[in-house]
Image (cartoon, grey):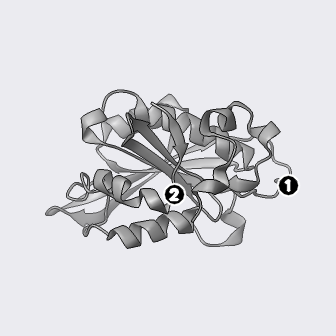
Amino acid sequence: MPIRYAGPQDAADMLAIYGQYIETEITFETKLPTVEEFAGRIKGVQHIYPWLLLEEDGRCAAYCYAHCPWERSAYQWNAELSVYVDKAFCGRGLGRRLYAVMLDLLRCQNVRVALGCITIPNPASIALHRHFGFEEAAVFENAGWKNGRWWNVAWYSRPILDGFNAPRPLLSWTRVPPEKAGRILAELGPEPKKWLV
């Protein structure tokens, strides 16, 4: 099941997975975006962060992306991760595979802290984050109203670079030197820019 860089041309396939969750509390979005809107989100993320897609027999089985959850420039060394798995492929470790590659890429970009935002309860997502060393950082009670009730949201956090010195500049995922990314780019392919439209 190869992992590759996704692009706007993959929007329809990934939107089909996201649509499986639109009626649930997993996402606080209540209306499914159009393919064009979803493609725009991919382009927006890809200015800085990678968007990954995992395939089985040419079919999109899961995807993962990162973004900075806050606008102010001092926050730029934080990245929130999101992963969605086609329900037909749940329970096979696809989320773990995508998170492992994404965390390695973010480290190469000089991201310092990885974050996860989880509507609770969600034992599967909590287990995924705990597997990678994330710890609960905050819980916001009654943060969202969906499906006839209020939901709490937990933020999980994990440092991925150590030290308290001034950070190195944040690199766009397309500017990570191949020698720094090593096996990651070997798995994903040497030309990430080919997926940009």
Q: For the point 61% across and 39% down, which residue is it?
A: 188
Three-letter code for the amino acid on which mark 2 is drawn: Gly
Rendered-image quadrant of the C terminus:
bottom right
Q: Is residue 77 left or right of residue 52?
A: right
> In this view of the protein, which residue sits in the foreground, 101 or 78?
101
Query: Where, by quadrant of the figure, is residue 159 drawn?
Result: top right
- Furthest residue to the right? 165
Helix, strand or loop at label 1? It is loop
Q: Residue 132 at x, y = what percent? A: 54, 32
Q: Residue 31 at x, y = what percent? A: 25, 70
* Mark sitting on residue 39: none
Helix, strand or loop at label 2? It is loop
Classify 24 as above or below 85.
below
Query: Where, by quadrant of the figure, is residue 46 drawn?
Result: bottom right
Q: For the point 41% across and 33% down, which residue is it?
A: 94
> In this view of the protein, which residue sits in the foreground, 183 or 168?
183
Asked whether disc 1 touches disc 2, contact meaning CB atoms under 8 Å apart, the reply is: no
The residue indicated by pointer 2 is: 7
Q: Residue 73 at x, y = what percent? A: 70, 70
Q: CA distance from mark 1 to mark 2?
A: 33 Å
Classify 49 as above or below 114.
below
Classify 148 as above or below 121.
below
Would you say residue 134 is visible in this rendering? no
Give the class, few, some or many, for how many residues have Cα within 10 Å of label 2's Cα (few <14, many ≥20). many
Q: Is residue 131 left or right of residue 15?
A: right
